[in-house]
Image (cartoon, helix red, strand yellow):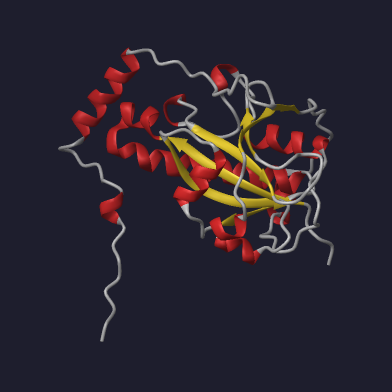
Amino acid sequence: MSVKRPRLRPLLPELDPTSFPAFRDRILEAEADAPSHAVRRYPGFPRVELPRPRHRRLPRFDDVVTRRRTCRAFEPRLPDAKALSAWLELGHGVTGPDGRGPTPSAGNLQAVQLVLVPLCSGWLGAGAYHYDRGQHGLARIGDGAPDWNEVVPSLSQAPGAPLLVVIAGEETAVAHKYGERGLRFLLLEAGQVLQSLGMAAAAGGLAVTPMGGFFEGQVHAHTGLGADDLVLATAVAGIPARP
């Protein structure tokens, strides 16, 4: 008996010559509104300032690409503040005007958000921390889950990982400009951010490993993200354990 395979296409509406004019006009109308490209902040929340990194001479790009690997074994400690700061700035920081950074952003809406959750004790206390790209700091916006292994079951593939990475996208921001096609752009942008974080980690002696099995609703609830934010991806990060 053959097993019917699921089809993914209905989840991502496709564009064709008949639908393109409406798609184009929607974009032009949204651009006429002159939306701001402000980087999200959480003023008034407990905050951890990160030291401004002084980037040392980095490895050549081809060395970084060949060095990047999926890591399953991590040292059971958080990277120090200096290493974490350099990684975040190179991976998702603001490096240009209007909130622009290392990865492309659909319409420069800067709709993708990054949240870090410590999975072990250390200099960064328990909770969920939104990365403030503009001011280069961490705002504690959530208390965290009682047991993240129950919320992200794929953590079992990297036992002892010290840091959970959550990538979320602001649905309303992209839907206003791109309609249903905005989901496609959010997913693309999340993947690009994750790749940028992976390359920046490899350059700085860290590692990032994507985690595909997670309960979106529970991750959202325990990280303190907004009602319009969609949880798009998770990963773990830290210092690779020595063989």
Q: Residue furthest bottom?
A: 1
88 over 40 or under it: above or below: below
Name which residue lies at 41% across and 33% down: 228
91 over 37 or under it: above or below: below
216 over 243 or under it: above or below: above
Q: Quadrant of residue 167?
A: top right
Residue 234: x, y in percent?
A: 56, 50
Most foreground residue, 105 or 151? 151
Most foreground residue, 39 or 59? 39
Q: Quadrant of the N terminus?
A: bottom left
Residue 124: x, y in percent?
A: 76, 39
Name which residue lies at 47% across and 30% down: 111
Residue 24: x, y in percent?
A: 25, 27
Most foreground residue, 108 or 62? 108
Name which residue lies at 65% across and 37% down: 91
Name which residue lies at 67% across and 63% down: 158
Q: Residue furthest front?
A: 146
